[in-house]
Image (cartoon, rainbow, N blue to C red):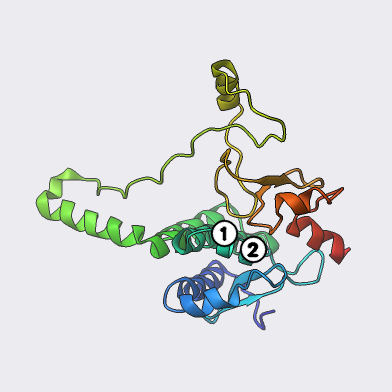
């Protein structure tokens, strides 16, 4: 995909910075164009950051395994089922994960040792994440650090941005009726949170969910465009990701 393959820590870091800049541009200054590019009616789409600080929304590569790690698949399916800011934040989180996977893929490919991997991580970690930039957390952290240092230089640590709200543990989706008894509710809480495989949100009892018979992940019906009526006629449901994998083989 690229003409020059990065081989040193500095080259990998420059590749990381270029891709990161492209992703940030897609999710901030070019957000309208990016939003329109992610049509839920299209097939599984991915957001790619390129080393020249540009971005593109495209289908995943056909090679299996791919030349480079692939970004999150099917980001367009969740676009209309979430608030725009939540959807952009979700894409940003997946973009951060992809950036690190590409950088350390190069590190593994060209035999980076322990010290080189540590230096690469420190260089990437010194930059705000895509998520922090998109949500404004990076600016809040800088402002807080500036305010704290102005008040007291001896205070040491700058104030960190507020942590993201913790997920509330709930029961996984169930097809049978819930009795609503207190003992059952306590058991359900112990089972942990079930998250939608498309948008990452928690299970809610007032929403229709469907489970993939291949990977056994749960999805909001609205995120994968399956209604309760349509689900009744599906003998074996395959999520967009599993459908795509099966199609490539």
The residue identified by callout 1 is 81
Outermost residue toward the front in this view: 229
Disc 2, disc 1: CB below 8 Å? yes
Q: Position of residue 91 (x, y in %)?
A: 54, 62
In the rendered image of this protein, does residue 233 appear above or below residue 83? above
Q: Residue at x 56, y 69 (%)?
A: 12
Horizontal side of 205 relative to 175 (left or right) equals left
User: Closest to the observer: 137 or 107?
Assistant: 137
Q: Position of residue 97 (x, y in %)?
A: 57, 57
* The N terminus lies in quadrant: bottom right
Q: Are there few (<14), some (14-19), or many (20+) residues within 10 Å of tag 2?
A: many
Q: Are there few (<14), some (14-19), or many (20+) residues within 10 Å of tag 1?
A: some
Q: Position of residue 39 (x, y in %)?
A: 62, 73
User: Closest to the observer: 198 or 56?
Assistant: 198
- Quarter of the view holding residue 6: bottom right
Q: Residue at x 87, y 48 (%)?
A: 235
The residue identified by callout 2 is 77
Horizontal side of 146 relative to 204 (left or right) equals left
User: Closest to the observer: 230 or 12?
Assistant: 230
Horizontal side of 103 relative to 177 (left or right) equals left
């Amino acid at each position: 995909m690229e003409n020059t393959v990065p081989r040193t820590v500095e080259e990998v870091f420059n590749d990381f910075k270029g891709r990161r800049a492209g992703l940030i541009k897609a999710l901030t200054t070019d957000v309208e164009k990016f939003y329109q590019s992610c049509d839920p009616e299209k097939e599984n789409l991915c957001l790619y950051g390129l080393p020249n600080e540009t971005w593109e929304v495209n289908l995943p590569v056909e090679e299996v395994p791919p030349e480079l790690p692939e970004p999150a698949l099917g980001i367009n399916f969740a676009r209309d089922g979430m608030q725009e800011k939540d959807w952009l934040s979700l894409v940003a989180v997946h973009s951060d994960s992809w950036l690190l996977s590409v950088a350390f893929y190069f590190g593994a490919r060209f035999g980076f040792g322990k010290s080189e991997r540590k230096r690469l991580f420190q260089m990437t970690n010194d930059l705000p994440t895509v998520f922090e930039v998109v949500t404004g957390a990076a600016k809040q952290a800088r402002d807080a650090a500036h305010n704290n240092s102005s008040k007291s230089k001896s205070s040491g640590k700058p104030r960190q941005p507020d942590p993201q709200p913790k997920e509330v543990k709930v029961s996984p989706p169930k097809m049978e009726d819930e009795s609503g008894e207190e003992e059952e509710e306590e058991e359900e809480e112990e089972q942990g949170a079930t998250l939608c495989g498309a948008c990452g949100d928690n299970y809610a009892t007032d929403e229709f969910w469907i489970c993939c018979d291949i990977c056994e992940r749960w999805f909001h019906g609205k995120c994968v465009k399956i209604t309760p009526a349509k689900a009744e006629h599906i003998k074996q449901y395959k999520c967009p990701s599993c459908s795509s994998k099966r199609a490539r083989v």
